[in-house]
């Protein structure tokens, strides 16, 4: 969770690395909508988590929240603050719905048409998790580190680390995890 300026900068650096962006330019800010949404979300998390009784700071948070909510509606995202760890990569715009109580670790790569959580319970995902297009994760489940979740998988039970899961309902299809499959950028693979 972003708790201060230092952690905010680290989250931002990890997020840019996940998108394979070394330096954020004006062109990339204008044309990479998912990245723009995400960087604003990180700024909102900083302002929200370090709230002080300062009317100017509160106004900045409110304006950012409003602008990002409009962008999220256009992109099809329902992603609340303080859910994802650093290194998040939203691969493409499209419907992504995440429950506010879900907890997802660092280096998550998520595709469109994905739902995480429901009213009955919410998932907890570890680090280095790849979520394929159309995956549905629900219930009070735990997914370990280095897990690849296949396209259109329905995950309603817990799984350990270093596996690939797919199917309806999801089951282990391979003992090879997400990092070994090369679904993350090379810069992330080097650090783990």
Image: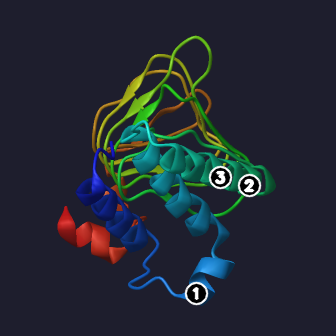
Tag 1 near tag 3, CB within 8 Å: no
Secondary element under disc 3, as helix, strand or loop, is helix
CA gap, disc 3 and disc 2: 24 Å
Q: To which residue does mark 2 refer? A: 94
Q: To which residue does mark 3 refer? A: 63
Which residue is at 42% across, 78% downward? Answer: 20
Percent of width and height locating residue 142: 37, 26
Percent of width and height locating residue 54: 45, 42
Percent of width and height locating residue 44: 50, 50
Residue 21 in sight in this render = yes
Secondary element under disc 2, as helix, strand or loop, is loop
Q: Nearer the viewer, mark 1 or mark 2?
A: 1
Residue 92, picture quadrant: bottom right
Whichever of callouts 3 and 2 sits on the residue coming sooner in the sequence is 3
Q: To which residue does mark 1 refer? A: 26
Percent of width and height locating residue 147: 37, 45
The 10 Å Cα crowd at callout 3, few under 14, some 14 to 19, many 20 or more, is few
Indicate left or right for 87 with 157 as reference: left
Residue 148 in sight in this render = no
The 10 Å Cα crowd at callout 2, few under 14, some 14 to 19, many 20 or more, is some
The 10 Å Cα crowd at callout 1, few under 14, some 14 to 19, many 20 or more, is few
């Amino acid at each position: 969770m972003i708790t201060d300026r230092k952690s905010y900068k680290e989250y931002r650096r990890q997020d840019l690395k996940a998108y394979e962006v070394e330096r954020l330019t004006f062109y990339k800010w204008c044309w990479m909508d998912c990245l723009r949404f995400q960087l604003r979300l990180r700024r909102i998390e900083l302002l929200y988590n370090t709230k002080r009784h300062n009317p100017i700071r509160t106004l900045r948070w409110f304006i950012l929240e409003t602008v990002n909510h409009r962008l999220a509606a256009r992109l099809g995202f329902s992603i609340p603050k303080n859910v994802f760890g650093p290194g998040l990569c939203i691969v493409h715009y499209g419907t992504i719905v995440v429950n506010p109580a879900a907890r997802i670790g660092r280096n998550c790569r998520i595709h469109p048409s994905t739902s995480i959580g429901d009213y009955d319970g919410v998932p907890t995902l570890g680090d280095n998790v790849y979520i394929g297009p159309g995956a549905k994760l629900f219930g009070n489940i735990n997914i370990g580190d280095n897990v690849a979740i296949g396209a259109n998988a329905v995950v309603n039970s817990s799984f350990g680390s270093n596996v690939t899961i797919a199917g309806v309902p999801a089951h282990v299809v391979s003992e090879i995890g997400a990092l070994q499959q090369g679904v993350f950028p090379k810069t992330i693979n080097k650090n783990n």
